[in-house]
């Protein structure tokens, strides 16, 4: 397996305007993605205001290695928190994922990401070598959630011009189709002019539930 080329975006704060529907109720809200790192470690936090639930906060922390982001912990918190811990033995033997929920451990695959770090890892991969990911190609990664770990395949789409609250931005779409009937479809737009950061994130679930995050403000973190 050839090494993954990557170029990680500089630390940033992305504020999003959110349009969504949950339990048949349409709503508008705000979200914030806070992205910070140094030469060795990173921290990402995504907070979304969701009616009837409150603030849903996802956090990914970990290291930066030769393959890019290497998560060590992922958490997903609404009313309560669930977390996944990435265990990588020091002797180089096979790793595994431990879940705080009552679900079995999962084997840890090389290059694994979580449901938040994947947005930034994909951007880093395309930033370093966009020619490797032409339209119609597929990026396959193990993605760890708070309860499970699955192989996700992101299909690379074409470039399109998005009209966002931030302004008009050229972006490349990547899409992951749900693996099961109850899973979430993920559509992601990365903007080359903004260090391949996610300028739009669309999450679609069965029964018409959706969250559509569109970039409103891009700034440096405090």
Image: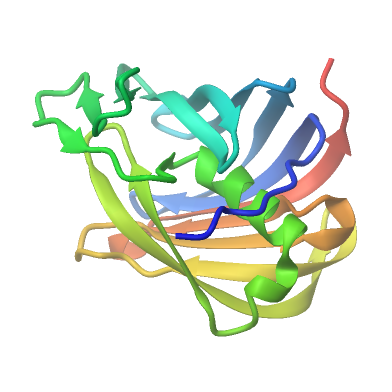
Tell me where residue 94 sits by quadrant.
Answer: top left
Q: How many labels does the image show?
A: 0
**Image quadrant occupied by the N terminus:** bottom left
**Height in image: 84 above or below 207?**
above
Q: Residue sitting at 71 percent across and 42 percent down?
A: 16
Specify whether 178 is left or right of 12: left
Q: Residue sitting at 82 percent across and 22 percent down?
A: 221
Specify whether 13 is left or right of 92: right
Residue 28 appears anywhere in the view: no
Tell which of 49 and 47 is nearer to you. Answer: 47
Tell which of 134 and 49 is nearer to you. Answer: 134
Residue farthest to the bottom? 136
Residue farthest to the front? 91
Location of residue 48 in the rendering, given as x and y in whole percent from the top left corner: 56, 33
Tell which of 108 and 152 is nearer to you. Answer: 108
Q: Residue sitting at 63 percent across and 23 percent down?
A: 42
Q: Residue sitting at 82 percent across and 50 percent down?
A: 195
**Height in image: 19 above or below 220?**
below
Tell which of 191 and 53 is nearer to you. Answer: 191
Tell me which colouring the rendered structure shows. rainbow
Specify whether 169 is left or right of 148: right
Location of residue 144 in the rendering, given as x and y in whole percent from the top left corner: 33, 40
Location of residue 186 in the rendering, given as x and y in whole percent from the top left corner: 46, 60
Tell me where residue 11 sits by quadrant.
Answer: top right
**Image quadrant occupied by the C terminus:** top right
Specify whether 25 is left or right of 83: right
Location of residue 49 in the rendering, given as x and y in whole percent from the top left corner: 55, 31
């Amino acid at each position: 397996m050839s090494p993954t080329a990557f170029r990680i975006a500089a630390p940033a704060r992305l504020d999003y305007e959110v349009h969504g529907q949950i339990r048949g109720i349409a709503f508008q809200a705000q979200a914030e993605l806070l992205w910070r790192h140094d030469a060795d470690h990173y921290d990402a936090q995504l907070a979304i205001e969701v009616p009837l639930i409150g603030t849903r906060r996802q956090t990914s922390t970990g290291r930066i290695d030769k393959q890019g982001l290497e998560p060590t912990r992922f958490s997903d918190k609404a009313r309560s928190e669930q977390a996944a811990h990435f265990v990588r033995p020091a002797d180089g033997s096979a790793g595994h994922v431990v879940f705080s929920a009552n679900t079995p451990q999962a084997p840890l695959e090389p290059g694994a990401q979580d449901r938040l770090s994947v947005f930034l890892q994909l951007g880093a991969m395309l930033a370093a070598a966009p020619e490797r990911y032409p339209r119609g190609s597929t990026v396959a990664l193990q993605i760890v959630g708070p309860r499970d770990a699955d192989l996700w395949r992101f299909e690379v789409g074409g470039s399109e011009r998005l009209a966002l609250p931030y302004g008009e931005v050229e972006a490349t779409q990547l899409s992951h189709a749900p693996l099961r009937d109850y899973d979430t479809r993920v559509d992601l737009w990365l903007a080359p002019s903004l260090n391949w950061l996610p300028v739009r994130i669309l999450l679609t679930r069965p029964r018409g539930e959706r969250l559509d995050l569109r970039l409103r403000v891009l700034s440096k973190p405090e």
